[in-house]
Image (cartoon, rainbow, N blue to C red):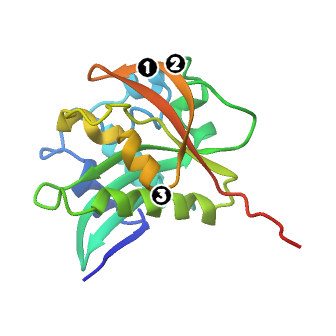
């Protein structure tokens, strides 16, 4: 059965992908880049899940989910850059004034990794942004030059993953993760008028 990527409208499935095993645990919930640093630091334990549940109910949910049949197997956080901490991040430059979207987290469940789901998630994030009239979409992956990346830090993706999805390197950054520089990768979503 092919992997299907859909908007993240199921809180239960988002919780499966990014929530803690214990509801009172203080984990990311994929909010670190979705909120300002001050907002992110102020939220704890159940408050984090409650906020994600509200975000999932919004007209534009906070990302996309990958499914293998009825089983959720992947997550990608994607939204307008203006609604993320990338709007004010000084380490990752703004290229222009376009109302671009950002994809900042790609997670695949254990047991499903290495099967191409991250590629499908990134393609799904691009379609999600395109369906919401984004002129372009950016990611800020690691430029690991083929070196092994620690799985806990691989959530931002690699340059190759983004290149395979048609993104091009647009800028360097002052951000480093797991010892690797992060770069700005961008894909234009504007349709060309050929008439």
Secondary element at tag 1: strand
Q: Is residue 126 left or right of residue 180?
A: right
Q: Nearer the viewer, residue 9 or 189?
A: 189
Count of labels in the image = 3
Q: Is residue 108 left or right of residue 54?
A: left
**Residue 125 place in picture, x, y as percent:** 48, 58
Mark 3 to mark 1: distance in Å? 23 Å
Furthest-bottom residue in view?
1
First along the sequence among labels 3 and 1: 3
**Residue 54 appears in the picture as rendered:** no
Secondary element at tag 2: loop
Give yes or no for contact between labels 1 and 2 (Cβ–Cβ under 8 Å): yes
- Label 1 sits on residue: 175
Secondary element at tag 3: helix
The residue drawn where x is 26% and y is 23% is: 178
Mark 1 to mark 2: distance in Å? 5 Å
First along the sequence among labels 1 and 2: 2
The residue drawn where x is 27% and y is 48% is: 18
In this rendering, the answer to whether 71 lies above or below 52 is below
First along the sequence among labels 2 and 3: 2
**Residue 177 appears in the picture as rendered:** yes
Quarter of the rendering occupied by the C terminus:
bottom right
Give yes or no for contact between labels 3 and 1 (Cβ–Cβ under 8 Å): no
Mark 2 to mark 3: distance in Å? 23 Å
In this rendering, the answer to whether 100 lies above or below 183 is below
- Label 2 sits on residue: 91
Q: Is residue 84 left or right of residue 76?
A: right
**Residue 169 place in picture, x, y as percent:** 54, 37
Furthest-front residue in view?
145
């Amino acid at each position: 059965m092919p992997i299907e990527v859909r908007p993240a409208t199921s809180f239960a499935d988002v919780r499966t992908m990014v929530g803690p095993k214990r509801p009172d645990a203080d984990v990311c919930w994929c909010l670190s880049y979705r909120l300002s640093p001050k907002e992110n630091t102020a939220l704890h334990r159940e408050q984090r899940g409650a906020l994600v549940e509200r975000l999932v109910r919004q007209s534009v949910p906070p990302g996309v989910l990958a499914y293998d049949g009825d089983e959720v197997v992947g997550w990608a956080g994607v939204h307008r850059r203006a609604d993320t901490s990338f709007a004010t991040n000084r380490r990752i430059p703004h290229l222009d004034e376009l109302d671009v979207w950002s994809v900042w987290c790609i997670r695949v469940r254990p047991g499903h990794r290495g099967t191409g789901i991250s590629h499908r998630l990134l393609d799904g994030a691009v379609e999600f942004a395109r369906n919401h009239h984004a002129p372009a979409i950016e990611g800020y992956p690691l430029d690991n030059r083929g070196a092994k990346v620690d799985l806990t830090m691989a959530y931002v993706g690699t340059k190759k993953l983004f290149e395979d999805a048609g993104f091009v390197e647009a800028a360097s950054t002052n951000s480093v993760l797991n010892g690797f520089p992060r770069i700005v990768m961008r894909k234009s979503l504007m349709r060309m008028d050929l008439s």
